[in-house]
Amino acid sequence: MTHDAAVLKAQEIASRVLASSAGQNDKAGRFSTEAVESLGESGLLALMLPVDVGGSGLGPRTMAAVIAMLAEADASVAMVYLMHTLGAATMAAARPGAAQTVSPILREIGTGRHLSTLAFSEAGSRSHFWAPVSRAHRNGNGVRISAKKSWVTSAGHAHSYVVSALAPEGKGPTDSTLYLLPAKTRGLSVAGPWDGMGLRANASSPITLDDCEVPSDFQLTDDGAGFPAMLNVVLPLFNLGTAAVALGICRAAVAGTVSHLKGARFEHLGQSLGESLPTLRAQLAAMQIDTDGLSARIDDLINHLEKPSETTMLRVLETKAAAGDVAISVTSAAMRICGGAAFSKHLNVERLFRDAHAGAVMAPTGDVLREFIGKALLGMPLF
Ligand SMILES: Cc1cc2nc3c(=O)[nH]c(=O)nc-3n(C[C@H](O)[C@H](O)[C@H](O)COP(=O)(O)OP(=O)(O)OC[C@H]3O[C@@H](n4cnc5c(N)ncnc54)[C@H](O)[C@@H]3O)c2cc1C
């Protein structure tokens, strides 16, 4: 699959499967199994995996374009897709000792029949996902893990979970290890419903691990090497992907606002809203400027990821922080411009406004990113 073919497939799924059901799924808080099926059939679930396991071997540029396209129709599905892509990338980067377990799962993803996700955040350390409070305990060659994972996208729908826990002999708070837990692992259960303000259709419920037995070939990183995997494998793609979700939301907000400004009329003046009010046109223009600015920022990050330099990590941090703010600002403007019609939920703008707020609270949160950037500029240690 080429970059263009992948984006076309995403566009086709967005218009055929996502667009018509996003509103209903949001209202009902319903996870779209048909969206995941379509993504699997199209080959998009294996977008970044190596060709020898059935993947397309494509990079962050295509991932971001696919995610933005999906998010324009349904941000919940785009986030499900992003978390899966991160799970798959972590498995693809696993230590050689996990090959016996990981290879067949990667091939299953290659055939589009396996959805994965990340279970990092814990009730105990909240948004500080780099410091799990759960600890793996030795159990023969493997380990046993008990943990309270506070939010897990696709909980109850994923076939596997990439889980963090402190390494058995880990000394410091970031000495974690990553493990792969199949959904059917004894002791793994969804611990509650998901009734979020936004991204309501992505099943981000808590999960509980109750003395789960994890054999050694399900250990994805070396002991204590979970933290570098989080920073090097997950963080750049997660930050890029959440920025792409934000971009899709902003594009949909601009389109929804344009449509309302053209369609809604002051009959007594014989004009549409857009024709009648320069103030609304100016606010719409600001939305467009911010959306294109975010797009340029995402392109800049992709260029950095393709050709890393000493400023790449700074761009990784900046892009997610900026994207969260832009998505909230652009969708807030859309709410204001579309007025009572948006407030009364006659338009999709209200769903976009709610969905836009997730990016900034997903870890690393916007506040944490700004804290890291400030510390980095002052030459202070981040952790
Ligand atoms: C829709 C959704 C899907 C999610 N999916 C997943 C998933 O698939 N996997 C997963 O592992 N997690 C997931 N999460 C969890 C997410 O990544 C965060 O861990 C979670 O949202 C943190 O919420 P909290 O209230 O516990 O944050 P808290 O840590 O309690 O933060 C509260 C406030 O304090 C601020 N804050 C915290 N630390 C600092 C600091 N050092 N400096 C400055 N400000 C700070 C935060 O920005 C926030 O405003 C998801 C969350 C959501 C909302």
Image (spheres, rainbow, N blue to C red):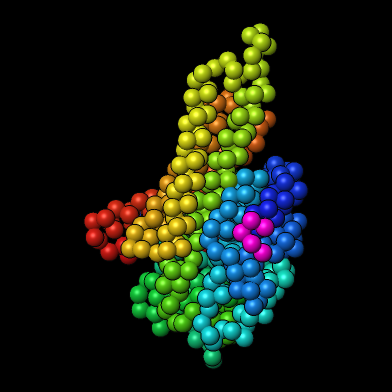
Tell me the quarter of the picture where residue 107 sits: bottom right
- From the top left corner, tell me how far across and down residue 119 is, in percent: 55, 66
- Seen at 42% across and 59% down, the residue is 304
Q: Quadrant of the C terminus?
A: bottom left
- Seen at 65% across and 76% down, the residue is 53
Q: Residue furthest bottom?
A: 140
- From the top left corner, tell me how far across and down residue 147 is, in percent: 53, 70
Tell me the quarter of the picture where residue 43 sits: bottom right
Near-viewer residue (154 or 252): 252
Residue 155, visible in the rendered structure: no
Is residue 186 found inside the magenta-colored segment of the image? no
Q: Is residue 190 above or below residue 270?
A: below
- From the top left corner, tell me how far across and down residue 261 is, in percent: 61, 24
Near-viewer residue (381 or 167): 381
Q: Quadrant of the N terminus?
A: bottom right
Residue 334, visible in the rendered structure: yes
- From the top left corner, tell me how far across and down residue 6 is, in percent: 65, 58
The residue range painted magenta reads: 1-5
